[in-house]
């Protein structure tokens, strides 16, 4: 895979309402190519809404989202699919097709790249050698080559999330979005997944925007942190500036949060993926 | 309370909010149901006493069936084979009809509400019209015989399977399909990768169940000219050849039992 230069992502006074409820109350930010951006905030602060505006799963009620100068709002049909192909999304629940083999799930990332009659043979899950080899090397890259022919639901959560990463590698995206990618993993696997993401982003020059539950993950892996509170951007700065004052600004006092919103668990030293 | 929790849970019992009595509503519902069932009994001329008094007549009727006649058993057995073949092709036709209808009639997959509505209503019509009616219709087009029966069975079952397929699709885990959509895949690819693997086991099970039920339907569709053993069932009963009719009934029972056993074996092996 050749190094990719991600386009600039611009959010212009993005507002998003769901009925009477305001999820985003005017967010403006500019994300530079190659940045690793963490979005943090309490549940309901608008993190996922912001992410879904970037993936164009939803459109803002007001304001605009631009990628490489292109407004995402009018996209439809083939142009919308092309946009989705250039944005790789990893989910909290992995969103892999459980009954498919691991390699088939990675090959899903190749679907938008198929041309001509190969698109139709893919309906029967028949791919040419070039596509299969591409998917296999993506799988190798996350250290799961040996699992290629297993059914996906036989893998552990951490392994499934790495399959999801292999899938978006196969997709050759320009931007990676993470919707709580490590929230349902244990600390070890969470760290492993974040390491893998970080390594890919650095090697390929890809932009990563990810919501993260653990402030500690944001501190360790992100270049820049966006803090949301009640739909407003209350913090925008380098991860090293995320001090106790900033945390209070984003999350409120612990007594206000009332539950485990602020998770400051100590992370283990990350294990490196052998590849 | 005397246990270790007495300190927390002791004291005077708390005053629960007043509860509304359901007695009146339950009584009214029971009376209403009884009224409806009573009227329905009048409509169907329910006379249980007559059944008790004249139950002996059934014995007279059945007596003729105690001695099955095996003179034409070869012909009847062959008609059972024809019946199974009608059900096999009928189910295949139903499968082919049900896939597009089921895909377009699933709310979470249909490309447009109008398409959804059209597919749903088409399936309703196919299901509402009995296979016997379809058989009468196809007999006028392709003549008496198994071909008409197979068409009738396939069309009706196509509606049933289509409805079951669309409902299975509406129950899939949307996350798994979203993972495919988000990769930039088109409609057909989302179906092939995100939907088909999820619905396949259940749907195959439905197809096999319907095959069993198609065997039973095919065994009687011959009465209206749809070919197979049904014609002989009708013919022997109507002309009071009790021994012959008994043979036909025995063969049908054996055939239905065999196919049920085989298809449930397949279902267990495949799913």
Image (tube, coloured by chain):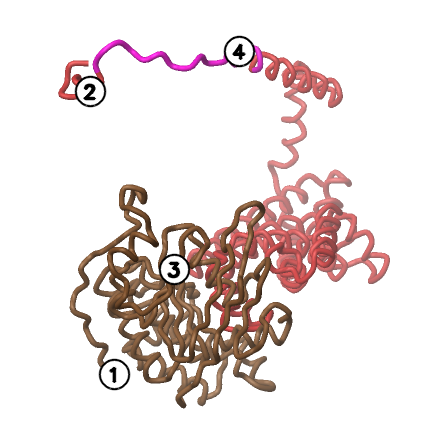
Asked if the residue at tag 1 contacts the one at tag 4, i.e. Cβ–Cβ closer than 8 Å, the answer is no
User: Chain drawn brown, letter?
Assistant: A
Tag in front: 3 or 4: 3
Q: Chain of mark 2?
A: B
Tag in front: 2 or 3: 2
Quadrant position of residue A132: bottom left
Specify whether disc 2 shares its chain with disc 3: no
Quadrant the C terminus of chain A occupies: bottom left
Mark 3 secondary-structure assignment: loop
**x and y percent of residue A206 in the render?**
39, 80
Badge 1 density bin: few <14, some 14–19, many ≥20, Cα 10 Å: few
Q: Is residue A104 visible?
A: no
* A83 in magenta: no
Q: Chain of mark 4?
A: B
Asked if the residue at tag 1 contacts the one at tag 3, i.e. Cβ–Cβ closer than 8 Å, the answer is no
Q: Which residues are magenta?
A: B10-25
Frontmost residue, B214 versus A274? A274
* B16 in magenta: yes
Frontmost residue, A97 versus A55? A55
Asked if the residue at tag 2 contacts the one at tag 4, i.e. Cβ–Cβ closer than 8 Å, the answer is no
Whole-Å distance between the Cαs marked 3 and 4? Answer: 48 Å
**B122 lies left or right of A182:** right
Which dot marks residue A275?
A: 1
């Amino acid at each position: 895979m050749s190094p990719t230069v991600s386009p600039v992502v611009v959010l212009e006074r993005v507002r998003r309402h769901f009925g009477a409820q305001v999820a985003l109350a005017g967010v403006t930010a500019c994300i530079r190519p190659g940045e690793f951006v963490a979005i943090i905030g309490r549940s309901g602060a608008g993190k996922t809404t912001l992410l879904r505006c970037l993936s164009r799963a939803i459109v803002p009620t007001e304001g605009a989202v631009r990628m490489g100068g292109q407004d995402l709002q009018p996209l439809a049909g083939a142009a919308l699919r092309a946009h989705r192909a250039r944005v790789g999304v990893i989910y909290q629940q992995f969103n892999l097709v459980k009954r498919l083999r691991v390699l088939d799930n990675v090959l899903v990332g190749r679907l938008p790249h198929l041309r001509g009659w190969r698109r139709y043979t893919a309906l029967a899950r028949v791919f040419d050698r070039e596509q299969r080899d591409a998917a296999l090397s993506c799988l190798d890259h996350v250290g799961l080559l040996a699992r290629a022919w297993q059914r996906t639901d036989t893998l552990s959560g951490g392994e499934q999330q790495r399959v999801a990463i292999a899938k978006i590698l196969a997709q050759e995206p320009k931007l990676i979005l993470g919707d709580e990618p490590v929230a349902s993993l244990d600390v070890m696997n969470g760290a492993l997944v974040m390491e893998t993401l970080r390594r890919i982003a650095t090697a390929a020059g890809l932009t990563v925007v990810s919501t993260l539950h653990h402030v500690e993950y944001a501190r360790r892996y992100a270049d820049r942190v966006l803090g949301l509170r009640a739909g407003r951007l209350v913090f925008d700065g380098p991860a090293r500036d995320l001090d106790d004052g900033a945390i209070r600004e984003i999350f409120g006092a612990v007594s206000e949060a009332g539950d485990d919103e602020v998770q400051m668990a100590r992370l283990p030293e990350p294990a490196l993926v052998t590849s | 309370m005397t246990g270790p929790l007495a300190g927390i849970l002791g004291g005077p019992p708390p005053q629960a909010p007043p509860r509304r009595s359901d007695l009146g509503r339950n009584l009214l519902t029971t009376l209403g149901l009884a009224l409806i069932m009573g009227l329905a009994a009048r409509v169907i001329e329910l006379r249980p006493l007559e059944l008790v008094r004249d139950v002996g007549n059934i014995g007279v009727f059945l007596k003729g069936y105690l001695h099955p006649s095996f003179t034409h058993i070869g012909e009847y057995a062959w008609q059972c084979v024809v019946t199974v073949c009608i059900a096999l092709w009928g189910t295949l036709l139903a499968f082919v009809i049900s896939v597009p209808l089921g895909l377009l009639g699933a709310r979470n997959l249909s490309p447009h509400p109008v398409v959804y509505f059209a597919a749903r209503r088409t399936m309703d019509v196919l299901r509402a019209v009995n296979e016997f009616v379809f058989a009468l219709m196809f007999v006028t087009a392709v003549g008496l015989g198994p071909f008409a029966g197979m068409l009738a069975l396939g069309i009706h079952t196509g509606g049933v399977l289509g409805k079951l397929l669309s409902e299975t699709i509406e129950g899939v885990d949307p996350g798994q399909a979203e993972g495919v959509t988000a990769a930039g895949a088109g409609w057909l690819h989302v179906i092939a990768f995100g939907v088909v693997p999820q619905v396949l086991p259940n749907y195959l099970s439905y197809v096999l169940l319907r095959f069993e039920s198609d065997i039973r339907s095919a065994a009687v569709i011959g009465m209206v000219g749809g070919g197979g053993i049904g014609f002989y069932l009708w013919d022997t009963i109507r002309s009071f050849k009790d021994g012959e009719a008994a043979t036909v009934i025995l063969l049908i029972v054996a055939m239905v039992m065999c196919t049920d056993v085989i298809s449930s074996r397949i279902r267990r092996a495949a799913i």
